[in-house]
Image (spheres, rainbow, N blue to C red):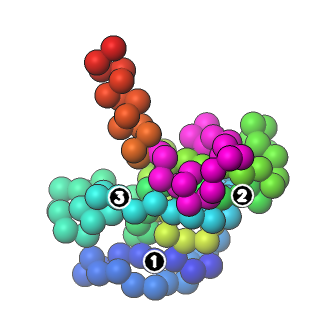
Amino acid sequence: MKAITLNKNFQLEDAVIEKPILKDHEILIRIKASGFNPIDYQMIENELERRLLKSPILGRELSGIVVEKGADAHQFNIGDEVYCGSGSMGSSGTYTEYIAVPEAIAAFKPKNISFEQAAGIPSAGLTALQILTVYN
């Protein structure tokens, strides 16, 4: 599958990588939209941020369609529209065609918004939720 990755010189390049193999608790998502955030730029420009990078694929939020489920994944069905953040819990980045994520970090995409709108929710939404939690 196609992906945009960071090479050894921390420059972006097109790559062909293997499609993810699911673990029992994961879902495979065909990515329809991916967000771009400061963390993506920081991974390229900042050595401290690069240490957090577990995959050469950038991108930390997405929306898409569930195309496969692990044996212990029961929250979603094939064809469900979902969105989530990634990069934590061992998942790779989102600038690719498919991603395997733990089903616990995915949510159903609201029917009344586009894939592009849903892909913009995870980082900004989590930031807003954290602010409301701290100041309430």
* Residue at 46% over, 85% down: 14
- Quadrant of the rendered image containing residue 114: bottom right
Q: Mark 1 or mark 3: which is in front?
A: 3
Q: CA distance from mark 2 to mark 3?
A: 22 Å
* Residue 18 pos. (x, y %): 61, 75
* Residue 97 pos. (x, y %): 61, 71
- Quadrant of the rendered image containing residue 74: top right
Residue assigned mark 3: 37
Point out which mark residue 65 bears.
Answer: 2
* Among the two numbered marks 1 and 3 on one chain, the one whose residue lies closer to the N terminus: 1
Q: CA distance from mark 1 to mark 3?
A: 15 Å
Instruction: Label 1, secondary structure: give it.
Output: strand
In the rendered structure, are the residues bearing label 1 and label 2 in contact, judged by CB atoms less than 8 Å apart? no
Depth check: give the residue in front, 2 or 21.
Answer: 2
* Residue at 81% over, 55% down: 79
Q: CA distance from mark 1 to mark 2?
A: 20 Å
Q: Is residue 105 magenta?
A: yes
Residue assigned mark 1: 4
At label 1, counting other C-alpha atoms closer than 10 Å, the crowd grade (few under 14, some 14-19, many 20 or more) is many
Q: Is residue 112 above or below residue 115?
A: above
* Residue at 77% over, 50% down: 80
Q: Amino acid at mark 2?
A: Ile
Q: Amino acid at mark 3?
A: Asn
Please report the bounds of the magenta region as a residue range. Answer: 101-122
